[in-house]
Image (spheres, rainbow, N blue to C red):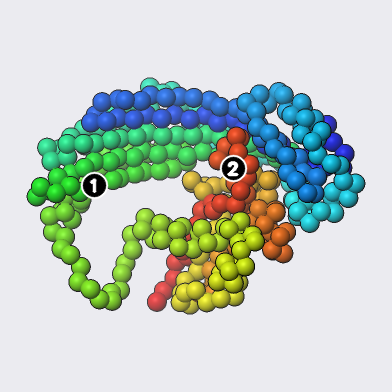
Amino acid sequence: MYKFPEGLYTDVRVESVFSTGLVYENSQMIQNKVKTDRGAFIRVYDGKRWFYSATSNPDGVQAEIDNLAKMACPNENILENPTVKLFEVNVGEDFKFGDTDVSKIPVEDKVALAEKYLPELKCDDMPMTRLFYLDKHTEKHIVSSKGTDIKFDYQTVAVVAFGMLVVNGLPQQMSWQKTGVKFDDVLGQEGKISAEIEDTREYAEKAVPVEKGEYTCILAPIATGVFTHESFGHKSEADFMIGDETMIKEWALGSRVGSDILSIVDTGIYEGSGYVPYDDEGTKAKYNYIIKNGILSGRLHSAYTASDLGENLTGNARAINFEFEPIVRMTDTFILPGTT
């Protein structure tokens, strides 16, 4: 497919992204956007420096490779470089959404679905409302000079509603969402927004200030997710540790950071918003324990951070889109169930 320069490591990530964005404000449509983006991100590495290029013309990738190679210094031992040695070589296809690809669903059907839920947002005590329908289908093709050649897809679908209730003269935000990986996943949600509005209203009417003290708490899934993401997930992204001895000591593997019942995992293997069968360096998704039975057990890595810290790949090199290089970021991070 491409002619890779000798003495250099090269990889290419081509992306095709379809997305829909419908936005309603106070029941009036203010956005109806359907778009398709296609582009590529190219990296060349000589063992000392990375050279990057992004293009919206995938047909011009070879020229981008050649231009980057001119700036690099060929290294006959590039395959022995610690980072390059870690790169996995994967070959194959993993397409899951051919029959349910959201790009095949007429936008008129998506508008009809969104507008079916709008009447539930009409309340006298909720003067400001917003409703979103969002979907995205992404196909990626990653190839490398080591031999990787993989193609895969993933997608997400969501309906999200917000409203600002006014209860006893005070504002109280209502939010509701339904997410999935197929259009059918967000069908049949009639009555859910109304129920959430009623729950929010009841909470605002009856809530009282908490008294200072220690409590046994039952956290809602969204609160648990935010807590896990912010308190443990970001600290486990290994690029924060590179060159920071203080952080490495404070967040040392083997340290006790929670009770025996606490185990936290990060993985891209489950379909949903964190699903990535391969990361943007072509590493196959792993099941990574960040914390196991209260003990800090692992970190999240790209090939560079794993080689620098002498650890294993985790499948967490991720880019925002084809305009950006991969950096270490979480996939699907969650607390495992257990008993007390």
Question: Looking at the rendering, in which quadrant would you find the C terminus?
Answer: bottom left
Kindly identify the residue that appears in the image at 90 percent across and 46 percent down.
76
Please give the label number shown on residue 293.
Answer: none
Which residue corresponds to mark 1?
173
Residue 27 at x, y percent in the picture: 24, 29
**Residue picked out by circle 2:** 319
Numbered label tally: 2
Element marked by disc 2: loop
First-in-chain label (2 vs 1): 1
Q: CA distance from mark 2 to mark 1?
A: 32 Å
Front in this rendered view, residue 195 or 20 = 20
**Residue 171: x, y in percent?**
17, 47
| Residue at image location 76% in from the left, 40% down from the top | 44
Q: Nearer the viewer, residue 94 or 283?
A: 283
Q: Residue at 72% across / 59% down in the picture?
A: 307
Query: For the view shown, which residue lies furthest in the left direction?
Result: 168
Measured as percent of width and height from the top left, residue 109 is found at 38, 25
Local crowd size for mark 2, using a 10 Å CA cut-off: few (<14), some (14–19), many (≥20): some
Q: Secondary structure at mark 1?
A: strand
> In x, y percent, where is residue 154?
55, 40
Amino acid type at circle 2 is Ala
Q: Nearer the viewer, residue 220 or 311?
A: 311
Q: Is residue 297 visible?
A: no
Query: Does residue 288 appear to the left or right of 90 in the view shown?
Result: left
Instruction: State whether residue 263 is above or below residue 80.
Output: below
